[in-house]
Image (cartoon, coloured by chain):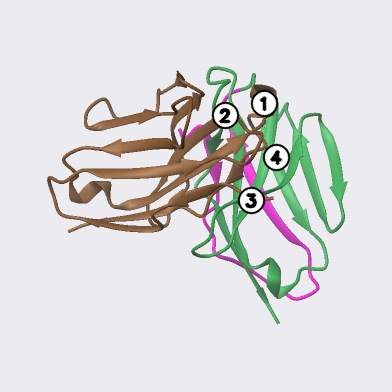
Chain colours: A brown, B green
Amino acid sequence: NAGVMQNPRHLVRRRGQEARLRCSPMKGHSHVYWYRQLPEEGLKFMVYLQKENIIDESGMPKERFSAEFPKEGPSILRIQQVVRGDSAAYFCASSPDELLIGKQYFGPGTRLTVT
Amino acid sequence: QKEVEQNSGPLSVPEGAIASLNCTYSDRGSQSFFWYRQYSGKSPELIMFIYSNGDKEDGRFTAQLNKASQYVSLLIRDSQPSDSATYLCAVILSGSARQLTFGSGTQLTVLP
C-alpha cells in the first residue's frame, strides 16, 4: 500500500530556471495539498486541488507559482524563474475526502535548493 | 497575532516524565484541531485530533481542548527518547475551512 510519493526528493536549480515538483497521492485519495516549509518554520499552506480542479490557492504566491492535478498522472507544482528565497522543503499531502481535510498523509517532501 | 501559536522550545524532559505541549489559536469559530509529529528531516504524521472540549486519550497521548480559552494541548505520558521530534499544532480555521493552518511547532527532546 504505497503512501504519498514525491519526486524528486532533492532538486537543485540555478536562479531563473524552472522547478517542477511531482506528487502522487495515496491510492484512493483524490484530494491533494501542497505546503512549503522553510528551515525552523512550520508548514505554510499553498494550494488544495482535486482532480482537474483548484479548490483553494489562497496560499500560493501570485506570480511564478502554479499547480495542477490532471485527470491522469501526478499533481505538479511548478515554480518559474526560481529565486534564492524559493529554497525550502515542499511537501505534498493527500486525503480521501474533503470532510477529512485535517487527516492528511504527507509525502517525503522535495528539498529545493536554488543556487 | 499569528493565527496558530506555539512555543518554539526547545522543550526538554527526562525519560519517563510527562511532556506538555501547548497551542493557542486566534479564531474563536475554529472547530477542528490536530497534532502532527515531525522527526528531523522527515515528513509530518498525524498523531491526534480533537473536535470537542475536554480530553481525548490515545495510548500515551492525551489531547486537551478548551474552546473558551482558545487553546489546545498535547500531553505525552511516560516520554521516551523516540518521542523526540517537533510537534505541530494544526487548526481548521472557520475562515479558511479548506486548509490546515499550522503553528511553527515545538521541538521536544526527551533525555535518556
Q: Quadrant of the C terminus of chain B?
A: bottom right
**Badge 1 element:** loop
Which residue occupies the foreground of this view, A102 or B86?
A102
Pointer 2 and pointer 3 on the same chain: yes
Disc number for residue B72: 4
Which residue occupies the foreground of this view, A84 or B18?
A84
Circles 1, 4 touching at the beta carbon (< 8 Å): no
Q: Is residue A66 visible from the viewing direction of this image? A: yes
Ranked by sequence position, the earlier of labels 2 and 3 is 3
Pointer 1 and pointer 4 on the same chain: no
Q: Position of residue B47 (x, y in %)?
A: 72, 49
Ranked by sequence position, the earlier of labels 2 and 1 is 2
Tell me which segment is drawn in magenta: B1-27
Instruction: Indicate yes or no whether the magenta region holds residue B26.
Output: yes
Circles 2, 1 touching at the beta carbon (< 8 Å): yes
Q: What's the distance in space between the residues labelled 1 and 4, CA to CA?
A: 25 Å
Pointer 3 and pointer 4 on the same chain: no
Badge 2: chain ID: A
**What amino acid is found at the position of numbered circle 4 in the picture?**
Val
Q: What's the distance in space between the residues labelled 2 and 3, CA to CA?
A: 16 Å
Q: What's the distance in space between the residues labelled 2 and 1, CA to CA?
A: 7 Å
Q: Quadrant of residue B26?
A: top right
Question: Which residue is rendered at x = 58% and y = 51% of the image?
Answer: B44
**What amino acid is found at the position of numbered circle 2 in the picture?**
His
Q: Which residue is mark 2?
A: A31
Q: What's the distance in space between the residues labelled 3 and 4, CA to CA?
A: 32 Å
Q: Considering only vertical position in the picture, is A79 above or below B41?
A: above
Disc number for residue A97: 1
- Residue A77 left/right relative to B35: left
Ranked by sequence position, the earlier of labels 3 and 1 is 3
Q: Which residue is mark 3?
A: A2
